[in-house]
Amino acid sequence: MRVLRLLAVALACCGWWPPGSQGKTLRGSFSSAAARDAQGQSIGRFEFHGDHALLCVRVSNIAVAVGKEAKLHLFQAQEWLKLQENSDGYSCSEKLSKAQLTMTMNQTEHNLTISQIPYPQTWHVFYADKYTCKDDNENSQVEDIPFEMMLLNPDAEGNPLDHFSAGESGLHEFFFLLVLVYFVIACIYAQSLWQAINKGGPMHMILKVLTTALLLQAGSALANYIHFSSYSKDGIGLPFMGSLAEFFDITSQIHMLFLLLSLCMGWTIVRMKKSQSRPLQWDSTPASTGIAVFIVITQSILLLWEQFEETSPHSYYSHHNLAGILLIILRICLALSLGCGLYQIITVERSTLKREFYITFAKGCVLWFLCHPVLACISFMFNDYQRDKIITIGVILCQSISMVILYRLFLSHSLYWEVSSLSSVTLPLTISSGHKSRPHF
């Protein structure tokens, strides 16, 4: 089992470090070549809301910008999608003429106010100049234009100072409250939990793995809060902290996957191969180890694949690509498989106390695995800009509740403690450690 845990951490560490996402203060260069190749250079997108949203851009070489007749074109997401679907029906110049807003860059600094937005909308920003729609290579040697762009929404007082898009608003406050809750809980329960872990016993390994996953979740929340705190000031944040938050989260997911698989497979395999008089016995077998290793590796590969393909900042809970869809399918399959295995145990279990224990454990498993797929489906009932936020907040809360359920279950003197006493066997995850006596706390 220790080998499995090391493997899980190694998989999370090897190669897992996605590049920092761009913030809403964008820096780069306006390129005539890139604009010509794509019929408009894509600069970014932003979900504006309110009556006084602002796009502010500063260019370093205004002479080159004026000479190239540089312009920014802003398209509403729906209109841009229509143009993409019917791209063959429009020429390059016709596409650019469909832009809802256009800004000619003939000054060092430009401010464009986007007003009268009835509801939050995604806008795409493109760069184009007089060379964009030409077929020759006249612009091949033209100098690029360095720029800095800020995309701002109105704050509570109506001033355009908020770097968060409509889909990101509220996340900073959410992570602050989450960190605060973790801190309060740590102050109340840390000492008693530490004592329980130090005393060892049949639940020692379970509590260690569960606590490690919880600490990683707390570390992810803290890193996200630090990143968002900086992001709220400059629109860039600390990409390193954002990547660290994702790293902590994926490692926590692997720990919890290992814990739940080990417990469920242990009970199922034992019930199939051993006598019914020892239903909670689990010795590490090639079958259980192989299945756990395969699933952990599969999820790790999918998580890595999904993160390296994801380009949107702050959306690592929102699966928008093939790897993300496969992750959701994997979670559904795991929930169904583990649920069926636990159901078979519950239906033949005669002891009310043991049945109550298995039912509670099943609730924690199903909640952990199914919260993401269910919330992804529910999110389609809301507007586009709300979906990522609903999934992110919902998944974190549901998985936190699942951890609370499991903690109460394994620390309860009326359930797991008594079940172990009644069965008089080694508990799951102890791997023949010899703890067959009643644990004391």
Image (cartoon, rainbow, N blue to C red):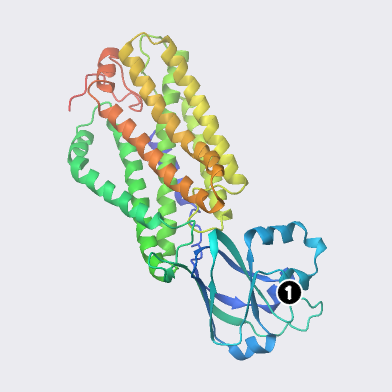
Dot 1 corresponds to which residue? 36
Residue 76 occupies which quadrant of the picture? bottom right
Q: Residue furthest bottom?
A: 63
Give the residue at x 79% y 78%. Answer: 134
Q: Position of residue 434 (x, y in %)?
A: 28, 22
Total number of numbered discs in the rendering = 1
Residue 284 shows in the view:
no
- Whether residue 326 is visible, yes or no, is yes
Which is more toward the observer, 379 or 211?
Answer: 379
Q: Residue at x 68, y 89 (%)?
A: 67
Disc 1 secondary structure class: helix
Left or right of 243, for residue 324? right
347 lies left or right of 117: left
Quarter assignment of residue 223: bottom left
Q: Residue 58 at x, y = what percent?
A: 53, 81
Q: Between residues 43 and 168, which one lies in front from this camera angle?
A: 168
Instruction: Locate residue 1, reporting x and y percent.
Output: 39, 33
Residue 158 in the image: above or below residue 16: below
Amino acid type assigned to the residue bearing label 1 in the image: Arg
- Residue at (47%, 24%) from the top-left corner? 339
Instruction: Report x, y in % for residue 181.
Output: 27, 47
Q: Residues within 10 Å of mark 1 (few under 14, many from 20)?
A: many
Q: Which corner quadrant holds the C terminus?
A: top left
- Of residues 198 and 211, the one nearer the viewer is 211
